[in-house]
Image (tube, helix red, strand yellow):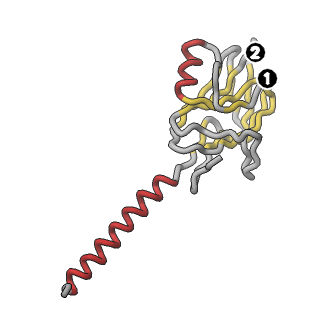
Amino acid sequence: MVSKRRTIGLIVLAGFLSLVAWGVADSSLYCPGQTLGDDVGSNIVILPQRHVDFHFQTTHQQKVQGHFTSNASIVLYIMTEPQFQTLNSTGTVSSYLWTTGATTDGWLCDVDNRCPTPTPVTPRAPGYILYDNPTFARAVANILLPIDITPCYPPYTG
């Protein structure tokens, strides 16, 4: 015969363990959003043949929102850390996860979740978003929608 006290203890222990298990599962599914760079209406100056970069930390693939216009043709890249390291050591973009291509009107996903194909997503690791100016003129990017790495719950699966 199991005592009433022991039964209550087992129920409390089972409840505690289920809360711990749910918390571990929940934290592995949730990833917070991040805003990179500047606010709406601000400008990012990119010197000729230079780039401006923003570092981020992610553990899941997450969609990236944003919109900019520019007075000169610039390129926005999403890169892994090794791709960014290669760019910094060689001075040349040799690989990337996603790009707008050279443009004066760059769209990533918008706030209504409309995205270009392929969808711009982060790596499942630290990475970089960078504005690259391949021209010989000073470029000014006007931020119309800040670069936002969207939260994922449940995780974005692409």
Look at the picture and state if 59 lies above or below 106: below
- In this rendered view, identify the residue nearer to me: 141 or 42: 141
Look at the picture and state if 46 lies above or below 14: above
Question: Is residue 74 visible to the viewer in this orientation of the structure?
Answer: yes
Whether residue 81 sits left or right of residue 41 in the image: it is left
Whether label 2 touches label 1, CB < 8 Å: yes
Whether residue 3 sits left or right of residue 114 in the image: it is left
Whether residue 157 sits left or right of residue 57 in the image: it is right
The residue pinned by badge 2 equals: 135
Q: Residues within 10 Å of mark 1 (few under 14, many from 20)?
A: many
What amino acid is at disc 1? Ser
| x and y percentages locating residue 93 in the rendered image | 65, 19
Extreme residue toward the front, this view: 1
Determine the residue positioned at 68% across, 22% down. Answer: 132
Look at the picture and state if 147 lies above or below 87: below
| x and y percentages locating residue 131 in the rendered image | 67, 26
How many marks the image carries: the answer is 2
- Which of the 4 image quarters holds residue 47? top right
Determine the residue positioned at 72% across, 26% down. Answer: 75
Whether residue 111 sits left or right of residue 15 in the image: it is right
| x and y percentages locating residue 22 in the rendered image | 43, 63
> Which secondary structure lies at badge 2?
loop
Q: Which mark is residue 8?
A: none
| x and y percentages locating residue 67 in the rendered image | 74, 38
Determine the residue positioned at 50% across, 43% down. Answer: 59
Q: Which mark is residue 73?
A: 1
What amino acid is at disc 2? Thr
Determine the residue positioned at 56% across, 18% down. Answer: 86
- In this rendered view, identify the residue nearer to me: 39 or 96: 96
- Which of the 4 image quarters holds residue 44? top right
- In this rendered view, identify the residue nearer to me: 103 or 84: 84
CA gap, disc 2 and disc 1 = 7 Å
